[in-house]
Amino acid sequence: MEAAVTTCYRHPSYETYVSCTRCERFICPDCMREAAVGHHCVECVKEGQRSVRQARTVFGGAVSRTAVPLVTYVLMGLNILAYLGELVRPGIIDRFAMLGAGLTGPDGGQYVYEGGDFPGFDVVGVAGGEWYRLLTGAFLHLPPGGSSFGALPFGVLHILFNMYALWNLGRVVEEQLGRARYLTLYLLSALGGSVLVYLIAPFDVTVGASGAIFGLGAAFYVINRRLGRDMQAVNRFMAGFLIWMLISAGFASWQGHLGGLLTGGIVTLAYAYAPAKRRATVQAAAGVVLLAVLVLLVVLKTSALTG
């Protein structure tokens, strides 16, 4: 008596005598997946993967040895593209830099805004409704020859230093926080830096990703402290960061640096110490509340400026 011919359940034309050790369906070599014992079919492997929970960091980021810092790459790319745009069209800075309040005269000239209404003059900046400047300014940098130093290389060094810091800090922070939390941290830090500039120095024109990068520096500190790592090297790093903030106060926006640092620290504290069972909810709520506070500060400052 001959044995019945068995074929692969996915490829009926393929004769086989090997079956899945989980569902016992017959499978051909193309459908075999190595298992601890025997072989599994494609569907059983997919079902098993769905039933396994994704390992996560204490901050909620997915653990993966092969993950690339995609958000860091994208942010660097956006900054570089914006810089190339500045080189082609220098007017981009005047249009999108962070500016709290200024005046454009009938002759097209730029004037300092001191409050009130001036017939024939238009209020520009955040006070004039250009809220987008609070974020767009964080993706612009000093063009060659556009610094207060008048030195040609400084504009290039501005973006080089910031992108170098973003590359080094961003990869570490993104790995721990995950892409969504990391992007939220970056944008809120950039926004926090711009808001403090608006509150303290609303008539200054500022550009640069430094506020967001100082936020990443604060996040780096909180992350290492939360993970219980040796803080000696981290403390030295943060001391250098703070010293640089003091030194750069003479030629850069210390308000933007400080605002980004404080915002990044607050956001990461919420990420780090949210209860595990309600982690995502608490983290999202903290971000929304902080955003609401920043928006309220902008509204109040605008009201005070415009009267």
Image (spheres, rainbow, N blue to C red):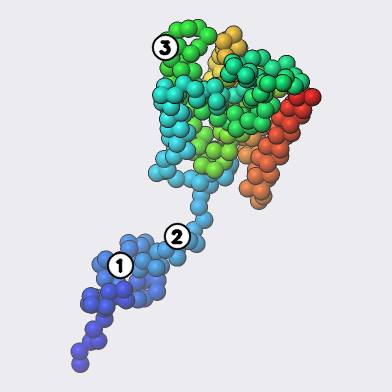
Occupied quadrant, residue 240: top right
Label 3's element? helix
Label 1's element? helix
Query: Which residue type does callout 1 highlight?
Result: Cys
Note whether residue 130 is visible: yes
Q: Residues within 10 Å of mark 2 (few under 14, many from 20)?
A: few
Query: Which residue type does callout 2 highlight?
Result: Gln
Occupied quadrant, residue 227: top right
Q: Is residue 246 above or below residue 29?
A: above
Label 3 sits on residue: 153
Q: Residues within 10 Å of mark 3 (few under 14, many from 20)?
A: some
Q: Is residue 242 above or below residue 166?
A: above
* Residue under the point 45% across and 63% down: 48
* Residue under the point 50% across and 25% down: 92
Indicate which disc, 1 or 3, sits on the residue closer to the N terminus: 1
Tell me, for residue 49, which label it has, or none.
2
